[in-house]
Image: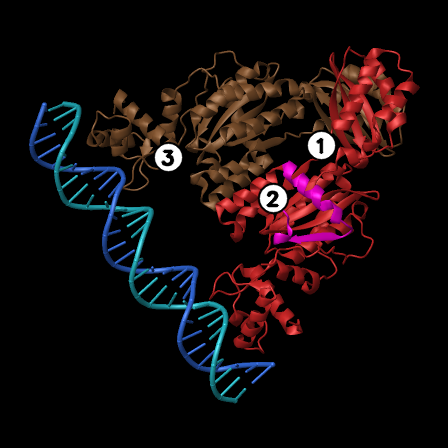
Chain colours: A red, B brown, C blue, D cyan
Amino acid sequence: MDMSERKLQILQAIILNYLETAEPVGSRTISRRFLMDLSSATIRNEMSDLEEMGLIEQPHTSAGRVPSSKGYRLYVDQLMKRDTVDDQQVGILMNLLKDKTVQLDSLLREIGDLLATLTKYTTVVTMPQLKRSKLKHLQLMPLDEHSAILVLVTDGNIVRNHVIPLQHPMDSRSLYRISDVLNQELSGLSVAQMDLPLIQKIKRELNVDSEVMESLLDAISDTLQHADDGDVFTSGTTNILSFPEFSDIARARSLMEFLSQKDQILHLISTEEKTSGPGLKIRIGTENQIEQLHDCSIVTANYRYGDRTIGTISVVGPMRMDYQKVVSALEGLMQDFPDLFFTGSGHNAITQEDTNGRET
Amino acid sequence: MDMSERKLQILQAIILNYLETAEPVGSRTISRRFLMDLSSATIRNEMSDLEEMGLIEQPHTSAGRVPSSKGYRLYVDQLMKRDTVDDQQVGILMNLLKDKTVQLDSLLREIGDLLATLTKYTTVVTMPQLKRSKLKHLQLMPLDEHSAILVLVTDGNIVRNHVIPLQHPMDSRSLYRISDVLNQELSGLSVAQMDLPLIQKIKRELNVDSEVMESLLDAISDTLQHADDGDVFTSGTTNILSFPEFSDIARARSLMEFLSQKDQILHLISTEEKTSGPGLKIRIGTENQIEQLHDCSIVTANYRYGDRTIGTISVVGPMRMDYQKVVSALEGLMQDFPDLFFTGSGHNAITQEDTNGRET
DNA sequence: GTTAGCACTCCTCTCGTTCGAGTGCTAACA
DNA sequence: TGTTAGCACTCGAACGAGAGGAGTGCTAAC
């Protein structure tokens, strides 16, 4: 079946109306509101074709049509207006953020909150993982007789701390000295690079005298290896409860529970990440691997530090999401923070997903 | 009207049955399940009295009775079994936590998660405020040309960091030196004590030579004064969606939204705090000031560092809450972490609220 | 190719009915 | 005097029938 211009118009009309009303759209509505020069009967015929093509669906006979995952996908890829972003609201608010924050993690949290407020959907931000970060500065601080605190400043001025057990008490002088040496050797390296051989090398160079020192170094290396705190920040989860598609409380609950499980989200992100590129990525309904997300769409932007992608900012909403608004908001964000995103290939670079949505 | 023993038994029966079924309880049920030697008619008469006393309510004429705030209050104060805590589950899990964490904030978060899982309600933990904390150690770390990071270790080994603007670049040597001096002067003091006069004194003693140094000290003092990050940690919010009393999605939403507004919670806690004492505090239904909490009950424990109360751990659930379970869990917690709670006056010290619940 | 017309489907809403749980009251009983 | 059986009454929940309406697919005419 060939895809006429008219069919596209009708599909678009269905989607626009459905985004607005959340009710199945009938042929008569389209004929009256969108394509006044066509009768409802004509539109009915076209709709029947669109349904056969898998772009729209009928909840039951005698109901109007609803867009399918595939239909939304076509809309997002071809029909959606991709006008240049000049959303004042975004701009103004973003500017407020800009000077306020020099620490990447706080900035990301603020962005998450802001996006949730603006879009009225839920945002999910994965924080940079320690393993992928570069060390900027490192410092040991005395805590008590049995432990010291290892403070790490990494890419984006993110500060993390870990408690390091001490075999014997150490004064701050010694801790400073060790910090200095470690800084010289390690700063500028990515945490993943700080493996055992490197530590061994440092031990040799330091000409480690005491057993105490040795165990301290081991503890530090151990901490660096095992600290793997990919944190997840979510904002606006309660917005989910205002969508009619989640008026069924069980459904809302299952989604909210999923979103509160950080490990699951990290797992999801890490498995999907290979397909990542510059620009936004949109996953619609059943294009999501996870069952709890089959009713949802996710728009994701990867953020970077330097030339490495180190995390993601996503907006999660029902399939019947205002894609245009979400895409505008995210693109506005990307324009406002060029340091944080890849903006190479112009702002129209939405990565397409291989159509691996189910067909039944 | 006098309060006979029998009336108390009936009240207790109503509450127990209602906790279990979430359905209004009729006279016949009580006669069959709890007080087999009395007829339903007798019980009806007594129930009528209990209603007049404001302890139970009738949703509508031909329905059974439901406990009122006042009824729950009486139950909690007089009827509830306060058996010695030996909840194995709590004990085992708490022990897992004990050695794992030396940092108070992580410990509190873990406790919050644990309590939410155990009770199936929602937990709200207010983190210690910086202002109320004592400084243990302080350290300036270089960040870039325009800023340094001030890392503070306070009571309970909580690590916080703030970015400090620099007028001119400073090398780590100088930062170390200043850190040393500040440590000598400030550590052991509460943050609230670090006011302007003290800073002036330090300036004089340091015999501050350069303008650079002076502005740095000002920035630090400014940061200490204005950092007021009472954080709030919540866990198990999605549990709310499983209670029949929140099957109305609007109601659930209003509560969840309230719980996600950290500033509101902090405000609530800080206004209610004056009535705080050792032991648990229970607020039932309309005893809560905030409207969104009129259907809820909150059981709160204050935690301490040394001899000062510095924060609270609360369990929030529907009025029809299993008070006994929640109280056991919290008391178990208090027994397992004696350093964290006041446990002076035995474990039965529930603070009573002045009965300021509405009466209509 | 387009459209009017029509039969058909199926959801939704409403209304009346029934059913049952529960109450309050009264009168009888111990 | 307290307890109980009996009974009329209330009111929500559940059910089913029926009306209404939105929407469809098909056919035939333009």
Same chain? Circles 2 and 1: yes
Tag 2–tag 1 contact (CB < 8 Å): no
Label 1 packing within 10 angstroms: few (<14), some (14-19), many (20+): few
Which residue has dot 1 on it?
A229
Residue type at tag 1: Asp
Q: Please identify, in this view, whether the residue under mark 2 or under mark 3 is nearer the observer.
A: 3
Tell me which residue sits at (42%, 33%) in the image: B319
Q: Amino acid at mark 2?
A: Gly
The reply, left or right, for residue A104 in relation to residue A43 is right
* Left or right, residue B224 beside residue A117: right
In terms of secondary structure, where does tag 1 sit?
loop
Q: Position of residue A244 (x, y in %)?
A: 52, 53
Residue highlighted by disc 2:
A236
Give the residues in magenta: A262-290
- Tell me the residue that label 3 is attached to: B21
**With respect to residue A222, does B347 lie above or below?**
above
Residue B188 rendering spot, x and y as whole percentages:
71, 15
How far apart in space, not on screen, are marks 2 and 3 (Cα)?
A: 33 Å
Residue under the image location 70 percent in, 43 percent down: A271
Residue D30, x across and y down, in percent: 52, 89
